[in-house]
Image: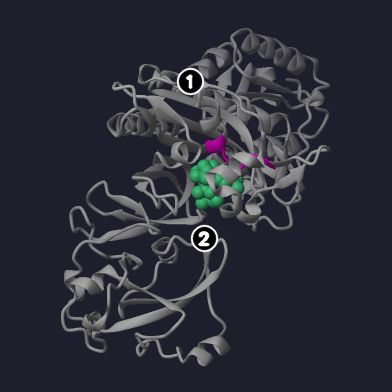
């Protein structure tokens, strides 16, 4: 590509709301532009990176035996009613009517559509297993779209759905998908961790998230300092807390009041925990299968007489109670007698803390921030039952499909690569993700010799299948160099004044080192570096 003809609108201006490096640099370097909150245009450079990531994902999914499909983005509301998710998804679903007054939603995920596709088409256990995926635009009307591509409203997702005759076979495929996701992130050169994840209200028998390690990540993960254990704090558990048995708070109980939001109503809930523990809100939501959680106003708490968290009464009307499972095993609690309770609901609702013992090996756990780039999920029969999707098993009996679902945020991955690979000058693309590998910079395009060498090398690299840019713009050298650093081409070949002595320079973006090279050897040297 000739830079003089390229549509790469670089700018010194950062988006006004941008705090993340990826948001700032992808916008400044002309990879994307914002249209409206959470809506982005991909410009030529951004589109190239997106395509590269898609290609890697396609190759690895193909290798794992999954087949690519492409389902309609506009999906009938009817299917969402059948699955029971029309209300559950709430305002994230963008709903609309067509001219005939039929109800539709823009697909935020495609479980319903995929089950409907397979239903009555796969009818026998002999046709199982099958794994179908797509790389597709999704729309979620996120409450707080932010951080650029990280949390958009319209975004690109790879979503796969597998169908099985047995749970054993689902477990096997789950492991295959975990290995596939691992390969994808390794090829992208990302530092990541696979962690146990919250399966939410849908239930299911297990899920894992792929977390790209970054301080800017929205998720907190607890990782063991010794073994492989890692979990999102939304679901993390701990081993025996030997060190805290002496704490005076250990045998005291506290209560935390929250309002839980359900499809049809709200409920006030008192959560009881050890006084040394904090409530984990996602666990709290799951304990009663709610959709969301919020705080009560101070005035409300006063009215209910619930301002003192160590003295909550056990017999209030119209209030639900949930007790942390740790209290079930506790003896001699200081300020409360739980033995009077009639069938209390015990659930894991505590939050793990840094330094807590790993549930696997008891070594201390530490906290790290992560970006969730993928989520793999054993769904079981939740959707196939709701949508009445069955196959005939070996005995000829109608049986709902066992299902797995595997999501990966393709556009979020673009941003994740930059979160892990940038410096104060701009983007630093890796070999597998760079929009172009080599940028040939002619310092002075009026110098015929410089321009001729630029053209010659440009053709040579193109013929060799190397993705190459020829910076043939009239602008000053300093300006062009800043531009190249901002965009982050892995290598810039500088043709400048030294050409009269038969020399050029190779600038490596990752290290910012400049290396002299003779005109005769520079092509071979660069080919060696990039292959
Ligand atoms: P989050 O907790 O970040 O909202 P999620 O649990 O809603 O994610 P899934 O429904 O599991 O996400 O979607 C699969 C993948 O799609 C996620 O792992 C993430 O990489 C990506 N993704 C989800 N929401 C967005 C978004 N608003 N913008 C960009 N990518 C997203
Ligand atoms: Mg979400």
Which quarter of the figure has residue 463?
A: top right
Residue at horizontal 26 percent and vertical 89 percent from the top: 335
Q: Position of residue 375 (x, y in %)?
A: 45, 42
SS at badge 1: helix
- Front residue of this view, candidates 438 and 86: 86
Above-or-below relation of 9 to 424: above
The range drawn in magenta is 105-112
Q: Position of residue 327 (x, y in %)?
A: 24, 74
Q: Position of residue 382 (x, y in %)?
A: 43, 42
Beta carbon at label 2 within 8 Å of ligand 2: no
Kindly report the distance in space between the C-alpha atoms of the residues bearing marks 1 and 2: 37 Å
Which quarter of the figure has residue 459?
A: top right
Residue at horizontal 38 percent and vertical 59 percent from the top: 233
In the displayed structure image, the side of residue 239 where residue 422 appears, left or right: right
- Residue 419 in sight: no
SS at badge 2: loop
Q: Residues within 10 Å of mark 1 (few under 14, many from 20)?
A: some
Mark number displayed over residue 59 = 1
**Residue on which disc 2 sits:** 291
- Front residue of this view, candidates 241 and 95: 95
């Amino acid at each position: 590509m000739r830079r003089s003809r390229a549509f790469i609108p670089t700018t010194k201006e950062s988006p006004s709301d941008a705090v993340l490096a990826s948001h700032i640099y992808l916008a400044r370097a002309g990879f994307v532009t914002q249209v409206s909150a959470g809506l982005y245009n991909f410009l030529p450079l951004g589109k190239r990176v997106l395509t590269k990531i898609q290609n890697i994902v396609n190759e690895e999914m193909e290798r794992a035996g999954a087949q690519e499909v492409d389902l309609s983005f506009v999906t009938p509301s009817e299917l969402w009613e059948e699955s029971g998710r029309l209300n559950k998804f709430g305002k994230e679903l963008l709903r609309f009517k067509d001219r005939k007054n039929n109800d539709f939603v823009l697909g935020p995920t495609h479980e319903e559509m995929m089950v409907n596709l397979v239903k009555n088409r796969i009818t026998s256990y002999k046709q199982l297993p099958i794994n179908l995926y797509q790389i597709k635009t999704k729309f979620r009307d996120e409450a707080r779209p932010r951080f650029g591509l990280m949390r958009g409203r319209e975004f690109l997702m790879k979503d796969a759905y597998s169908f099985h005759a047995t749970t054993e076979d689902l477990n096997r495929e789950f492991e295959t998908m975990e290995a596939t996701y691992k390969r994808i992130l390794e090829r992208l050169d990302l530092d990541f961790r696979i962690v146990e994840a919250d399966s939410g209200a849908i239930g299911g028998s297990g899920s894992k998230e792929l977390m790209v390690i970054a301080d800017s990540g929205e998720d907190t993960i607890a990782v063991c300092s010794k073994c492989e254990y890692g979990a999102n704090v939304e679901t993390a558990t701990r081993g025996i807390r030997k060190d805290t048995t002496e704490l005076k708070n250990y045998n005291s109980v506290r209560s935390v009041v929250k309002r839980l939001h359900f499809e049809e109503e709200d409920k006030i809930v008192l959560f009881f925990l050890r006084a040394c523990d904090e409530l984990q809100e996602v666990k709290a939501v799951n304990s009663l299968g709610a959709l969301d959680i919020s705080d009560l106003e101070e005035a409300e708490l006063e009215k209910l007489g619930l301002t003192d968290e160590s003295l909550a009464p056990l017999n209030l009307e119209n209030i639900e109670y949930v007790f942390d499972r740790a209290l079930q095993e506790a003896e001699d609690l200081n300020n409360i007698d739980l033995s009077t309770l009639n069938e209390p609901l015990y659930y894991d609702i505590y939050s793990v803390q840094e330094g807590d013992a790993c549930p696997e090996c008891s070594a201390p756990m530490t906290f790290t921030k992560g970006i969730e780039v993928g989520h793999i999920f054993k769904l079981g029969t939740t959707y196939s039952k709701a949508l009445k999707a069955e196959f005939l098993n070996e005995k000829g009996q109608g049986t709902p499909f066992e299902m797995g679902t595997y999501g990966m945020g393709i556009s979020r991955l673009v941003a994740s690569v930059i979160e892990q690979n940038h410096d104060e000058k701009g983007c630093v693309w890796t070999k597998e993700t760079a929009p172009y590998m080599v940028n040939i910079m002619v310092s002075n395009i009026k110098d015929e010799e410089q321009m001729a060498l630029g053209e010659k090398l440009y053709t040579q690299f193109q013929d060799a299948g190397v993705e190459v840019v020829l910076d043939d713009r009239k602008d000053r050298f300093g300006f062009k160099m800043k531009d190249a650093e901002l965009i982050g081409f892995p290598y810039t070949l500088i043709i400048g004044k030294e050409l009269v002595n038969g020399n050029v320079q190779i600038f490596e973006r990752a290290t910012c080192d400049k290396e002299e090279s003779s005109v005769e050897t520079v092509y071979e040297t660069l080919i060696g570096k990039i292959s």
